[in-house]
Amino acid sequence: MNQKQWVPYVAPMAIYMAFLLVESPANVAGLYPLKAITVAGALWYCRRHYVEWQQAPPPGAPGGAAALSWAVLTGFVAIVIWIALDPYYPKLRELQHGLDVWLNRLTGAPPPPPPAPAVFDPTTIGSPLARWTFIGSRVFGAVVVVAFMEELFWRGFLIRWLVNENFRTVPLGVFTWTSFLFTTGLFAVEHDQWLAGLICGALYNGLFYWTKSLRACIVAHAVSNAVLAVWVLATGAWQFW
């Protein structure tokens, strides 16, 4: 296998995660638009490598309107679950804090400070132009950039690479328990809302196996993020952003 075949699938995700490492409520207003533009630029630069999202499903798999319907339904159900579950389980940063408290107690160290809130309210941005630039980039980033970036990484690359390192030889939608469980688990811990991420990762994987279409997964992810954006803007539930 050409050892560089994985780079176009991994690089945009790596850039996105690098931004996350330095992103905070204090700087996100300026940093998020830059992140969306940078990752979108990386995807555009590598676009000729992404042949999978244009592939038609094989015979026997739902295609056309059927695949689109399944994608929209999966994306909508996934985000309804994401929102509905939110009040009922501890988030990843809370679990990490609980572990730190236990370890410090075990070692006799002073208790760690509580986790800082990870919520940014864009209505606090004074300039209307800056406020709507942030909101517009946040919606575009979630619905377009993240939907493409994550699906190319998780289901275009990683879920197939776990079947065979020469992932380009693995047809879309090939199932193994290892690839299913590993990608579902990693998708969960990528998000602070880990339980919702676990369920949604399983749903997106299920859609991938059913439709054997990366395009369907991109549509589902885009629908999820679009519905979430509408919910956040309508209700002010900024914790989801």
Image: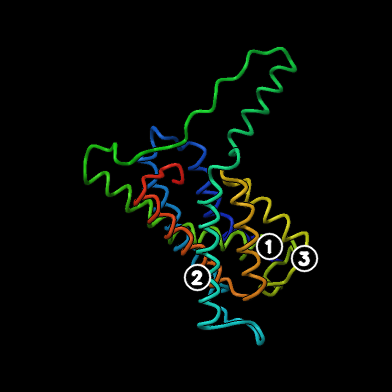
Residue 5 visible in the picture: no
Q: Residues within 10 Å of mark 2 (few under 14, many from 20)?
A: some
In front: mark 2 or mark 3? Answer: 2
Sequence-wise, the earlier of marks 2 and 3 is: 2
The relative height of residue 23 versus residue 180 in the rendered view (above or below) is above
Q: Secondary structure at mark 1?
A: helix
Q: Residue 176 has which mark?
A: 3
Residue located at (43% from left, 59% from top): 227
The image position of residue 24, as x and y in percent, is: 44, 35
Q: Which residue is mark 1?
A: 159
Neighbour class for label 1 at 10 Å: few (<14), some, many (≥20)?
A: many
Q: Residue at x 65, y 28 (%)?
A: 98
Q: Which residue is label 2 attached to?
A: 72
The secondary element bearing badge 3 is classed as: loop
The answer to whether marks 1 and 2 mark residues whose Cβ atoms lie closer than 8 Å is no
Is the N terminus in the top left, top right, bottom left or bottom right quadrant? bottom right
